[in-house]
Image: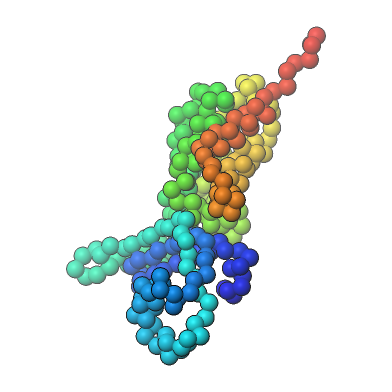
Amino acid sequence: MRFRHLVFRAQVSACHTIGETFAAIIHGRAFEIDVRAPEQAGFLAYVHEVYPDWDEWYGDDTPPQSRIQPTEMSAYAFAPSGPGGPRPPLNRVYPGKPALFAELVRAFSPIEALVANMDRLADQPPEKALPELAVSVWRTVSSHLGIVRPLLFEVASLGPDVREGVLGEFFPKVFVALGGYLLGQMAAGRLRPMHPILAIQSFAGPLILHLLLRPMVTEGLGLELDSEAAVREFATNWVRGMQPDPPHAGM
């Protein structure tokens, strides 16, 4: 990455790995620092430890440096399985990207929570069930947004490595659980008729956009948001907009 790009877009991510046993993924905002400033003495000592030839390389002409002020961090560790050493790396645990992607979706996406909550809320009217569903989905993903965001882009791209999992397992679960509920409410006259795919898109769209734009709103604009209240309001507005048209007078 060219350093000048950080002036225009300071949002960055970084991954630090130790062999194949540990990885830390950090998302945040980059700030330029002077590594020779007194307050950066600890950092400079670490740089010298990792790169003993640092001063020989740069002398006093140190290139621009930045640090990441983290907003999210995820860490993964493979604990030793025994005296023989660490567990096998991911490429041995999961046979290829499709299997790894499928496991990430199962572990971090809100699909299982959505299915479970639709079973629990199946007999509730839309004005109660759907705001509760939106909040439960947000609670499921809010603790690992840094993983969910790239998963969303992978799903949307529908590349060859994710196609089988998306079309063969994950989308059918969503369609049966949420689409089935919406079709039932439309048939009962509680929601206006609409193709269930479009209904799911219009319900999920504001939630996904909130997930994607939240860092810009909170960090870039400095606004504090109650995300649970926000997604509940999105769902409430959706239900309000999907109310059937009242019958015309005299009919």
* Residue 185 visible here: yes
Quick check: 9 left or right of 248? left
- Give the position of the C terminus as an image quadrant: top right
Q: Residue furthest left?
A: 83
The residue sitting at 55% across, 61% down in the picture is 11
**Residue 185: x, y in percent?**
60, 25
Quick check: 243 left or right of 166? right
**Residue 47: x, y in percent?**
39, 78
Display coloring? rainbow
Q: Residue furthest right?
A: 250
- Give the position of the N terminus as an image quadrant: bottom right
Quick check: 66 left or right of 17? right
**Which residue is nearer to you in this view: 76 or 121?**
76
* Residue 92 visible here: no
Residue 245 quadrant: top right
**Residue 231: x, y in percent?**
55, 37
The residue sitting at 33% across, 67% down in the picture is 21
Say above or below: 7 vs 226. Answer: below
Q: Residue furthest front?
A: 38
**Residue 201: x, y in percent?**
64, 41
Residue 16 quadrant: bottom left
Quick check: 182 left or right of 107? right
The residue sitting at 51% across, 85% down in the picture is 61
**Which residue is nearer to you in this view: 14 or 199?**
14
- How many marks are shown on the rendered structure? 0
The residue sitting at 56% across, 49% down in the picture is 222
**Which residue is nearer to you in this view: 67 or 113?**
67
Say above or below: 205 vs 193. Answer: below
Q: Residue furthest top?
A: 250
Residue 234 quadrant: top right
